[in-house]
Image (cartoon, rainbow, N blue to C red):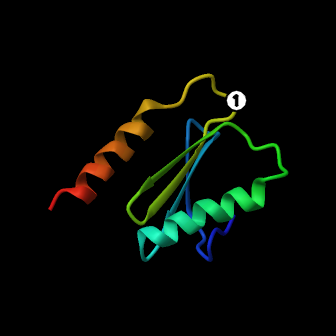
Protein backbone atom coordinates (compact mmCIF):
# COMPACT_ATOMS: atom_id res chain seq x y z
CA UNK A 1 0.00 0.00 0.00
CA UNK A 2 1.36 3.43 -0.92
CA UNK A 3 1.55 5.74 2.10
CA UNK A 4 2.12 9.48 1.79
CA UNK A 5 3.24 8.96 -1.81
CA UNK A 6 5.83 6.27 -1.03
CA UNK A 7 5.67 2.62 -2.09
CA UNK A 8 7.35 0.19 0.31
CA UNK A 9 10.11 -2.32 -0.16
CA UNK A 10 8.49 -5.61 0.87
CA UNK A 11 10.15 -8.66 2.42
CA UNK A 12 8.81 -11.95 3.77
CA UNK A 13 10.08 -13.93 6.75
CA UNK A 14 8.76 -17.31 7.87
CA UNK A 15 7.03 -17.55 4.45
CA UNK A 16 4.00 -15.50 5.55
CA UNK A 17 5.13 -12.58 7.68
CA UNK A 18 5.37 -9.41 5.63
CA UNK A 19 7.75 -6.57 6.44
CA UNK A 20 7.10 -3.32 4.54
CA UNK A 21 9.77 -0.62 4.72
CA UNK A 22 8.98 2.95 3.70
CA UNK A 23 11.80 5.47 3.35
CA UNK A 24 10.84 9.14 3.34
CA UNK A 25 12.93 12.25 2.82
CA UNK A 26 12.25 13.36 6.42
CA UNK A 27 10.82 12.15 9.72
CA UNK A 28 7.86 14.43 9.05
CA UNK A 29 7.14 12.39 5.90
CA UNK A 30 7.18 9.19 7.98
CA UNK A 31 4.72 10.70 10.45
CA UNK A 32 2.45 11.65 7.55
CA UNK A 33 2.77 8.04 6.34
CA UNK A 34 1.47 6.84 9.72
CA UNK A 35 -1.46 9.25 9.48
CA UNK A 36 -2.16 8.08 5.92
CA UNK A 37 -2.17 4.44 7.12
CA UNK A 38 -4.59 5.29 9.92
CA UNK A 39 -6.89 7.14 7.51
CA UNK A 40 -6.84 4.34 4.93
CA UNK A 41 -7.49 1.58 7.45
CA UNK A 42 -9.90 3.34 9.84
CA UNK A 43 -12.89 1.23 8.77
CA UNK A 44 -10.93 -1.95 8.02
CA UNK A 45 -10.18 -5.04 10.07
CA UNK A 46 -6.41 -4.65 10.28
CA UNK A 47 -4.37 -7.82 10.81
CA UNK A 48 -1.97 -8.17 13.72
CA UNK A 49 1.02 -5.99 13.00
CA UNK A 50 3.81 -3.96 14.53
CA UNK A 51 4.49 -0.41 13.42
CA UNK A 52 7.86 1.23 13.96
CA UNK A 53 9.35 4.58 13.09
CA UNK A 54 13.05 5.42 13.17
CA UNK A 55 13.74 8.94 11.90
CA UNK A 56 12.57 8.96 8.25
CA UNK A 57 11.96 5.20 8.07
CA UNK A 58 8.58 3.60 8.67
CA UNK A 59 8.32 -0.17 9.10
CA UNK A 60 5.21 -2.33 9.22
CA UNK A 61 5.57 -5.92 10.34
CA UNK A 62 2.56 -8.18 9.65
CA UNK A 63 2.75 -11.23 11.91
CA UNK A 64 -0.82 -12.45 11.36
CA UNK A 65 -1.22 -16.17 11.94
CA UNK A 66 1.69 -16.36 14.37
CA UNK A 67 1.21 -16.16 18.11
CA UNK A 68 4.49 -14.33 18.66
CA UNK A 69 6.39 -11.67 16.81
CA UNK A 70 9.86 -12.51 15.58
CA UNK A 71 12.07 -10.72 18.10
CA UNK A 72 14.74 -10.18 15.45
CA UNK A 73 12.52 -7.54 13.84
CA UNK A 74 12.34 -5.53 17.06
CA UNK A 75 16.09 -5.98 17.58
CA UNK A 76 16.83 -4.62 14.10
CA UNK A 77 14.52 -1.64 14.66
CA UNK A 78 16.19 -0.93 18.02
CA UNK A 79 19.63 -1.08 16.39
CA UNK A 80 18.45 1.14 13.53
CA UNK A 81 17.20 3.76 15.99
CA UNK A 82 20.56 3.65 17.79
CA UNK A 83 22.45 4.12 14.52
CA UNK A 84 20.25 7.02 13.46
CA UNK A 85 20.57 8.87 16.78
CA UNK A 86 24.32 8.46 17.34
CA UNK A 87 26.62 10.77 15.44
In terms of secondary structure, where does tag 1 sit?
loop
**Left or right: residue 10 compared with residue 46:** left
Q: Quadrant of residue 57?
A: bottom left
What residue is at 43 percent from the left and 68 percent from the top?
A: 27
Residue at the farthest right position: 43
The residue shown at (67%, 36%) is 48
Q: Which residue is mark 1?
A: 65
Task: Check the image and report above or below for 47 versus 31.
Answer: above
Q: Residue at x 47, y 70 (%)?
A: 28
Q: Position of residue 77 (x, y in %)?
A: 38, 46
Residue in the image at 67% along x and 59% along y: 37
Judge whether 86 appears above or below 62 on screen. below
Where in the figure is residue 46, as x and y percent of width and height?
Answer: 75, 44
Q: Position of residue 32 (x, y in %)?
A: 57, 68
**Location of residue 20 with respect to 29 vertically, above or below:** above
Other residues around mark 1 within 10 Å, as few (<14) / some (14–19) / many (≥20): few
Extreme-top residue of the structure: 67
Quarter the C terminus occupies: bottom left
Q: Which x, y percent locates residue 12?
A: 57, 47
Instruction: Determine whether 77 is above or below 70 in the image.
Output: below
Q: Nearer the viewer, residue 35 or 2?
A: 35
Q: How many marks?
A: 1
Left or right side of 34 for 37: right
Residue 47: quadrant of the picture: top right
Residue nearest the viewer, comparing 79 with 65: 79
Horizontal side, residue 3 vs residue 28: left or right? right
Point out the image quarter for the N terminus. Answer: bottom right
Amino acid sequence: MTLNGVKPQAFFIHDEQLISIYIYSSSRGAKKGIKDFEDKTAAADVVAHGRYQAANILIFYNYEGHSLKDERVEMVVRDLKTLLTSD
